Image: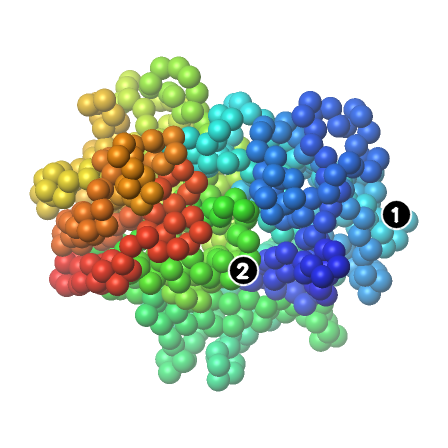
Amino acid sequence: MTAETTAPGNTMPRPEYPRPQLVRKEWLNLNGHWEFEIDHGDSGLERGLVERELTDRILVPFAPESEASGIAHTDFMAAVWYRRTVDVPAAWAGQRVLLHFGAVDHDTTVWVNGCEVGRHRGGFTSFTLDITDALANGGSTATIVVRARDEKAGPQARGKQSTKYANHTCHYTRTTGIWQTVWLEPVPAAVHLRRLRITPQLASQSFEVSAVLTANRAGDVLRVRVSDADGEVAHAEVATHLDLSPAVTLTLPSERVRPWSPEDPHLYGLQVELVDTSGAVVDAVDSYAGLRSISIQGRRFLLNGKPVFQRLVLDQGYWPDTIMTAPSDDALVRDIELSMAAGFNGARLHQKVFEERFLHHADRLGYLVWGEFADWGARQPGPYDDHQQPTTSFVTQWLEALERDVNHPAIIGWCPLNETWQWNSDRITQLDDVTRALFLATKLVDPTRPALDASGYSHRIAEVDIYDSHSYEQDPEKFATQQAGLAEGAPYVNVVEGREISTPYGGQPYFVSEYGGIWWNAELAAKAAGDDRAESWGYGQRVGDLEEFHTRFAGLTAVLRDDPQMFGYCYTQLTDTFQEQNGIFDFERNPKFDLARLREVQQQVAAYEAE
């Protein structure tokens, strides 16, 4: 129940099911045209915007800053309002009706039929509201009103969204309001499955599957089946009355074991049912899982017990006309395929919590990713020993991201912070507290994957699983000298103004998680001056021609690829992003360089894999 047209001849944008690891058959996609109004003074509640029609129209799920939305307003907006009346299908009568938002930036309040049904803070994480009680007298009409506030100042998880009027350096056009799919879903009224936790255990050739329920009833049973292309592989069931999160272990026969890997991204189907005493299925969802393991042995980061060199690229997930929203599901697939065509086998999903559809495609294509948070936006004026002040809301939002994405086999590590820094001093700062909270939360939610405390710059936690650095040194010889200490246990560590900002390296697996960023703009290269950084920006000195780019790329990459102690790297970046023009592809996804040459450099056997 998903088909809809937004206008005569126009098909609904982003019609695909948005949550591939928890699929129910019945749902209603609410993307399309909504009423819309910008509320510059954030006075809309006082002016009656909950009750009246709004003055404009917007195409959801595209943000009002984007061309695709039909609004294309790129100045600051204190608040924006949305309104739409929906007919809830009559077949859903007697069930609870859930309203899902993929993401709304940043501080959201939702009303249905004039009743406030919920609030959410955070522009990058999904949330769900039960609107059943707001449906008028048990009726089937829902007038949904959404207010999204997006403050200009103050600590807020913004990612790469510019806090100035215009884009600058590596900060880009803002996103305000709804920017991912909105949808309705019916669930059983008495009890239903809220979410699943799927933990692969390669050593025992099994999956542990637990289900969070809304209630416990005597006699109910949780039934789970694992299947592959040849049919059922394993099944198990457990009574649900004793545990709010009942769990089963499904052991796979040895002849049906097929580990998930980049070379063979095999996914098992999961069918999960909640069954009552009569044998009737109360609730059912479809999911999937990959059987793979991650382990650390000294400086070794192992996938399925083997060293797999991580040839990562920085992916920021922006598009020219739709900003942070992918223009289509195919666009998500294309970015992965373009990256792999250039020789990468994965990505850091940088300063953005990517939508679940991207992670689904990474799962099925065997594309390794680091799940990250969009933590930039907490920098405050003040002394250098506490210049970044993330709030408790950062912890809340990161927990939401972990809970949503923990089941995806393509995710091989977590990183809640990026390039935080402060001086080593004799006091514990707010940043220290939040950094530790984010790290501990990550390990409590998911002890099966390694976690960074922060990518690059300040490592403040001695027991952190992974150690890394960022370096945009553009001279391969100087880069080699800079990185030469890893073999002796003294790797390159970021400093600021010559001062230390991290706890000492403790022998963890190590990689350079940002390098390269080679600046190339063909049009500027043709100009005599050719150095307008407001128009085009990149790291270091811009290369003079394509051959110089390929030489520099090969030289920098070889330094990391040929180091037997280095488990991977991450090149900046996949695509140009607005004025930051150091991508392998331009903003429209056209290749800027010879992909065959880039692939040849990267596909040479890494010293880490050869040992």
**Residue 299 visible:** no
> Which color mode does the image show?
rainbow
Q: Where is residue 558 in the image (x, y as percent from the top left)?
A: 16, 52
Of circles 1 and 2, which is in front?
2
The label number, if any, that marks residue 263 in the structure image:
none
* Residue 581, image quadrant: top left
Residue bearing mark 2 = 329
Look at the numbered disc 1 and give the secondary structure of its residue. helix
When the figure is inspected, residue 492 is found, relative to residue 211, above or below; the finding is above
**Left or right of 302 in this view: 131:** right
Residue in the image at 49% along x and 53% along y: 405
Quadrant occupied by the C terminus:
bottom left
Q: Where is residue 254 in the image (x, y as percent from the top left)?
A: 37, 80
Q: Residue type at mark 1: give it.
A: Ala
Q: Residue type at mark 2: give it.
A: Asp
Task: Tell me which label, 1 or 2, sits earlier in the chain.
Answer: 1
Name, please, the residue furthest toward the right.
137
Q: Position of residue 509 (x, y in %)?
A: 23, 48
Residue in the image at 48% along x and 84% along y: 230
* Residue 95, image quadrant: bottom right
The label number, if any, that marks residue 136 in the structure image:
1
